[in-house]
Image (cartoon, grey):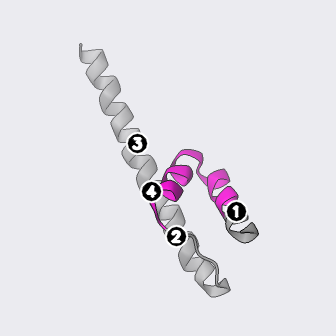
Amino acid sequence: MKKKNNLIIKTLIWCIKSLCIGVSIIFIYNIVGSFFNLNIPINIWTIIIVSVLKLPGLASIIVYMLIS
């Protein structure tokens, strides 16, 4: 039982860290991108993509935003 609780807590901590890192990456990109008139909207989908995939996720969102 203790092992299961430990796994749940570790997973929850990983999710919270990933969300914080994802929001931070998007926020920093928006600050730097404001000089070049580039920005990524902060919504649930962009946060999830960047949280899970990190920099490749950010790169894919940037490419998508430039193409569309």
Between discs 2 and 1, the one toward the N terminus: 2
Which SS class for mark 4? helix
Q: Which residue is mark 3?
A: 15
* Badge count: 4
Report the quarter where the N terminus lies. top left
* Residue depicted at x 24% and y 16%: 2
Mark 1: give few (<14), some (14-19) or many (20+) Cα within 10 Å.
few
Label placed on residue 53? none
Mark 4: give few (<14), some (14-19) or many (20+) Cα within 10 Å.
few
Instruction: Judge left or right: residue 44 versus residue 66.
Output: left
Between discs 4 and 3, the one toward the N terminus: 3
Image coordinates for residue 28, horizontal then vertical, percent? 53, 71
Q: Nearer the viewer, residue 45 or 22?
A: 45
Between discs 3 and 2, the one toward the N terminus: 3
In this view, which residue lies farthest toward the top?
1
- Give the distance between the C-alpha atoms of the residues marked 3 and 2, in whole angstroms: 21 Å
Between discs 3 and 1, the one toward the N terminus: 3
Instruction: Judge left or right: residue 31 versus residue 67.
Output: left
Q: Which residue is mark 1?
A: 64
Label placed on residue 41? 2
- Amino acid under disc 1: Tyr
- Give the distance between the C-alpha atoms of the residues marked 3 and 1, in whole angstroms: 25 Å
Which SS class for mark 2? loop
Which SS class for mark 3? helix
- Amino acid under disc 3: Cys
Image depth: mark 3 or mark 2 in front: 2
Instruction: Judge left or right: residue 54 versus residue 48.
Output: right
Label placed on residue 44? 4
